[in-house]
Amino acid sequence: RKEVEQDPGPFNVPEGATVAFNCTYSNSASQSFFWYRQDCRKEPKLLMSVYSSGNEDGRFTAQLNRASQYISLLIRDSKLSDSATYLCVVNKNGTASKLTFGTGTRLQVTL
Amino acid sequence: EAQVTQNPRYLITVTGKKLTVTCSQNMNHEYMSWYRQDPGLGLRQIYYSMNVEVTDKGDVPEGYKVSRKEKRNFPLILESPSPNQTSLYFCASSLWTGKNSPLHFGNGTRLTVT
């Protein structure tokens, strides 16, 4: 089983739709969690950290379920500019040296 | 402008010809790391450095070397490149090594080894 698993997609959604991605992780001792966004052929950029109580940043909501070992990202009112690959990132041991990246979920928002 | 700078952006070379990919950050970050990204495999860590003169292997270090003589620079060296090292490479840095310190990535180096 992969340490971090994501549905590769693509998720094709119309503008204005709500879309959600899940990511599962295998190491129950994992300590911190992130969503990064990667545009085609570009570098990944931090979208948001994921906190135990869930957190929101504008149209984006991240949730953590430790019991089931998954994190989720919800995007409301999708924009064309949200089209990208979303990478789930898990920190295994509490230091930046042990980040594990998922392979990403591709989102395509269309008119 | 705060950034991580990698060079070159694109590189085509032949098997066995030593090459270096440079990485420099101007944010006084302690932590630096190299990743390679391949289709279906995601980003995999090659080497990382927690501070000057401190480097350690990541998940896929074979065939690579690094050095951290200065805080700002973290070059990736391929002594004898092989075709299986054809990949997209990213350098990244973060302010400190704690679990919530976000990574800042360079804009990538696409390497082809023939």
Image (cartoon, rainbow, N blue to C red):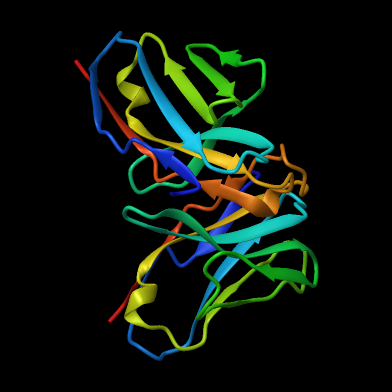
Image quadrant of residue B51? bottom right
Counting from the top left corner in percent of width and height, residue A30 is at: 65, 40
User: Is residue B44 toward the left or the right of residue A12 in the image?
Assistant: right
**Whole-percent x, y for residue B28 in the image:** 77, 52
Extreme residue in the left direction: A111
Quarter of the rendering occupied by the C terminus of chain A: top left
Is residue B77 rendered to the left or right of residue A80?
right
Residue at (66, 15) in percent of width and height: A53
Q: Residue at x 33, y 86 (%)?
A: B14
The tally of labels here is: 0
Whether residue B75 can be seen here: yes
Q: Residue at x 69, y 75 (%)?
A: B67
Residue at 51 percent of width and 87 percent of height: B79
Examine the rendered structure and indicate whether residue A46 appears above or below residue A41: above
**Picture coordinates of residue A2, whole percent (x, y):** 45, 49
Q: Is residue A58 above or below residue A62?
A: above
Residue A110 found in image quarter: top left
Measured as percent of width and height from the top left, residue B104 is found at 60, 45
Q: Is residue B12 visible?
A: no
Q: Which one is in front, A31 or A81?
A: A31
| Position above or below: B16 against B93 | below
Vertical side of A50 occupied by B93: above or below? below
